[in-house]
Image (cartoon, coloured by chain):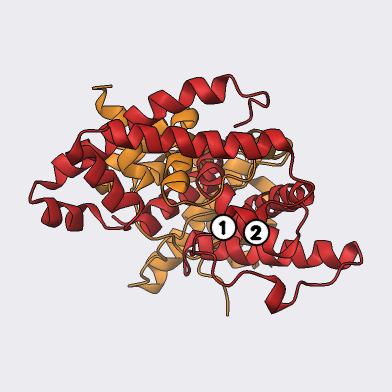
Chain colours: A red, B orange
Amino acid sequence: MGEREADLQLVERVQSGDREAFGLLVGKYQRKLLRLVMRLVRDPAEAEDVTQEAFIKAYRALPNFRGESAFYTWLYRIGVNTAKNWLVANGRRMPTMSEVTDDDSEGIEDGILLRDDETPDRVLMSRQIGETVNAAMEALPADLRTAISLREIEGLSYEEIAQVMDCPIGTVRSRIFRAREAIAARLRPLLDTAPDRRW
Amino acid sequence: MNDPRLSKISALFDGELETHEVRVAIQASVEDAERWRLYGLIGDSLRGEPIVAPDLTVSVMARISEEPVVLAPRNLKPLKRRHPFLALAASVAGVAVVGWVALTGNSQLSETHLALSKKEPVAVLPAPTFVQAQQTTVSGEMSEYLLAHHAQAGSTRLGDSTRQIRTVAIGSPRP
């Protein structure tokens, strides 16, 4: 089963009446969708509102989702349309191509997204999260660090990682899980003490 | 940390579960949404993607709690009509069931349907289906047949409602 099929399973669960399963989809794609929306709606607070609205629209439209495209592709279209409608409703124009960074999949320099209206605590929290994750990675045993890097950064499947690391797929699954847990253990104290505990 | 359910959350997040494991994993993930969100945060951070905003899940789910529950009916395979009379009998039986549900307010059928639908793991979503209600005026001959059939079934509730029967057809959406 791939990621697309896993998302379809979650969608089907929502379509069967389990609203909490939609929360998993929100948790998984909120940052990606927000980054997309921010290309169009530059103000971070307004982009958050538009992103929320996009998720609400997606939830309402879920009975019509047929699985012909990947869930995120479908969500992406809703996000773009919601942002466009918001711009029109608020008398704003769509940003030109030169004003929009090119590829959502490329790493975006912090300097591009940090605007004058970014709050200092948000900037600080973003950097602290990054530093904590990096420190946790450095502290990981090599096999765990390799496994999670191949998965999260290189995007390899478990089968591919198993071939690279010459180990069973079950071992790959275990290593990635243990790596995530080790990093999460370091993150939780930071997030629990954040001024805005919504992180 | 050695809880096998937790490792399933991690594998589900990557879409790397066997089909038979998915239901347990989804349940575990729903019950441990914080862990699910942390996994997403970790991945974004490792990829150098900026963490530009706090978690929106709580606010989104708060709004969704005010929304009606979305439900999508599943595709049911149409009955193969091998003999006209058998097809008619099958349709009549279906009408009788629907009529019984409507008249008694019995929701077990829909609940059973939902329960059955949850037991079948599927990898691909079926196309959405539409429940269409058609009103059909029943001929006198049909009416007599239905009344006779219904009398044999032991129910006395159909009565005059057979004169105008609502048929509910569940199938593929019309082009």
Q: In this rendered view, identify the residue nearer to me: A84 or B117.
A: A84
Say which residue appears at 62% left-offset and 56% top-offset: A35
Spatial separation of the CA atoms under disc 2 and disc 1: 6 Å
Is B23 located above or below residue A191 in the figure? below
Is B61 located above or below residue B160 in the figure? above
| Same chain shared by disc 2 and disc 1 | yes
Query: Seen in the image, is A82 located left or right of residue B11?
Result: right
Disc number at residue A112? 2
Callout 2: helix, strand or loop?
Answer: helix
Of the 4 image quadrants, the one containing the C terminus of chain B is bottom right
Q: In this rendered view, identify the residue nearer to me: A74 or B146.
A: A74
* Kind of residue at badge 1: Glu
Chain of the residue under the numbered disc 2 shown in the image: A
Quadrant hosting residue A144: top left
Say which residue appears at 68% left-offset and 63% top-offset: A39
Callout 1: helix, strand or loop?
Answer: loop
Binning the other alpha carbons within 10 Å of mark 1 as few (below 14), some (14 to 19) or many (20 upward) gives few
Q: Do the residues labelled 2 and 1 touch (CB within 8 Å)?
A: yes
Chain of the residue under the numbered disc 1 shown in the image: A
Residue A90 visible at all: yes
Say which residue appears at 42% left-offset and 36% top-offset: A133
Q: Give the x, y percent position of residue A115.
A: 74, 52
Quadrant hosting residue B29: top left
Is B89 located above or below residue A31 in the figure? below
Q: Give the x, y percent position of residue B169.
A: 55, 62
Q: Give the x, y percent position of residue A5.
A: 37, 56
Please identify the residue farthest to the front as the structure is shown: A111
* Kind of residue at badge 2: Ile
Of the 4 image quadrants, the one containing the N terminus of chain B is top left
**Residue that numbered label 1 is attached to:** A109
